[in-house]
Image (cartoon, rainbow, N blue to C red):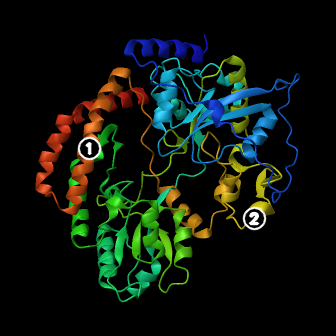
Amino acid sequence: MTPRTKFLALALALVMTLGLAGCAAAPDAASAATTAPAADSSAPAAQATSAPETTENPYAQNVDVRVFMVTDGEMDNMVTQKMEELFNLNFVWNLAPKASPDEPFNLMMASGDLDDFICNDPNDLFGYAGKGAYLPLNDVLAEKVPSFQKLLDENPSWVRDLSYNDGNLYYFPMISAIRTERVYYINEGWLALCNKDVPQTLEDWKDVLTAFKETDCNGNGIADEVPFTFRGDWTYLDFYEAYGIDSGFFVEDGQVLYGPYDARMKDYLEYVSDLYANGLIDPEYITLNNNLAKEKWVNNIAGAGYEWNTRIRDNNEGVAEMENAHFIGILPPKSVVDGSVSTRHQMDKLRTTGAGAIAITADEAVADRILALMNYNYADDTQYLASTGVEGVHYTLENGEVVFTDYVLNNPDGKAPRSVPGDDGANKDWPIRQQIALENIMPQEILDTRDIYEPIIAPSFPRLSFTDEEQSEITAAMSEIQTVVDEYINKFIMGTVSLDQWDSYVSKLQKAGMDTVLEHYNTAYQRYTGN
């Protein structure tokens, strides 16, 4: 019995038991199919790319492949059309928006009528792993996806990070070329105006931000400067890393800890609440999203902050004509313990959360075709299509190195080089081996910041796998725990709740089940490390 038919039987039994029939209709995958657009006349013609060599052509018969994918992009594009050509496929797209993917995903899973492969956040995929929904990959990789098996052999820890609690691998991941994602910025024009050096310690930061507050740094005669801004939809300000903690779970000396439950969080809150009380951090941080934050940067209102590394280009373009305005990326503040500099809050090389991962549900014939595509996307000599674009259109290979074409570097539509392959379907929301060449055509200020961040990124929190019982208790407890954390941490920062209430806050976390959650996390971590 195939994964899809096994899971369909399970889903039907569940529907009958729970009386859910009729309320979980599968999304109409056929309606998501789109007509291929006319070829872009501004793009050069693609060079012929040879199909995978075989004695007998296994791709002679055209195959429809239904794809559930979480993405905000258009998937019928130059890259996916080349994949269809190489493997004689017809992708039928069932797209779910990144802002609200859960409902269409869960409706499809509840119906049991699964698309041939599902591309989603690994954490969401794991919710149905081990239940017969997906093809277990362990026994097929060596024969059918040797390129990925080779990567696992070269990186043994990846097997632990990808495995479900039954020991099986159920999805193909994205592999990043870099890890730097979010960085500290500062306006070096404001620094010079205030006669200050780049801050290195927390004390330095308070001194510099105070100077920004007390100086008309943007020269408009209005006291509108925001010394430090950050986005509350991300986290509550990464200065906590200087105290050796994280905003979530982290490992220290072989033990899993939870930052908001750690006594050092109180020390951090004493520091940051003082900044807030003195008007040194953005009073609107809780409501700031991507666009609102950008307005403060490009209007030369924010002097420093924490943002996407790639945003530094846009910010500098926004203030290009303004006096005393130019942003640079700088290192995080030094540790209050030993003066070291590090950051955890970055991308993983092996993406086990956030990025698109593929789980296969198809019957054998279609599954084999998908596995062949996965092998192609990970292989040393063919990995470039999914990650970099179409050979001859976006790049050529010279002595094994990617060289981008004029269409990318001097795009006729004026697009930034980094965006051209992406707009045509490369480096999208599914498993790829991301190429450093694509990252290296970023503007120089982005590369400069990346160069100082890559060496200081600490290991990420591992991808732990829980038993069904453990996961059930964790899910039940973490909902209330997160509510308490979100409410109290921000109130502590803004001073609406005194830090004298710290013990009361800790007590609420304990009552919500924090100790049980940590017990399960540590048990899972011991399984992960083999201890």
How busy is the neighbourhood of tag 2: few (under 14 within 10 Å), some, or many (20 plus)? some
- Point out residue 381 in the picture as x, y percentages from the top left corner: 77, 41
Residue positioned 32% across, 37% down in the render = 255
Which secondary structure, mark 1? Answer: helix
Q: Mark 2 or mark 1: name the one nearer the start of the chain.
A: 2
Q: Is 85 on the left or on the right of 15, as rendered?
A: right
Q: Which mark is residue 391?
A: none
**Looking at the image, which is closer to me, 148 or 293?**
293
SS state under label 2:
loop
Q: Report x, y in % for residue 406.
A: 80, 63
Residues packed near mark 1 inside 10 Å, few (<14), some (14 to 19) or many (20 plus): few
Q: x, y (%) of residue 34? A: 70, 40
Judge whether 259 appears above or below 531 on screen.
below
Which numbered tag is attached to residue 483?
Answer: 1
Q: Give the distance between the C-alpha atoms of the residues marked 2 and 1, in whole angstroms.
A: 47 Å
Residue designated by label 2: 411
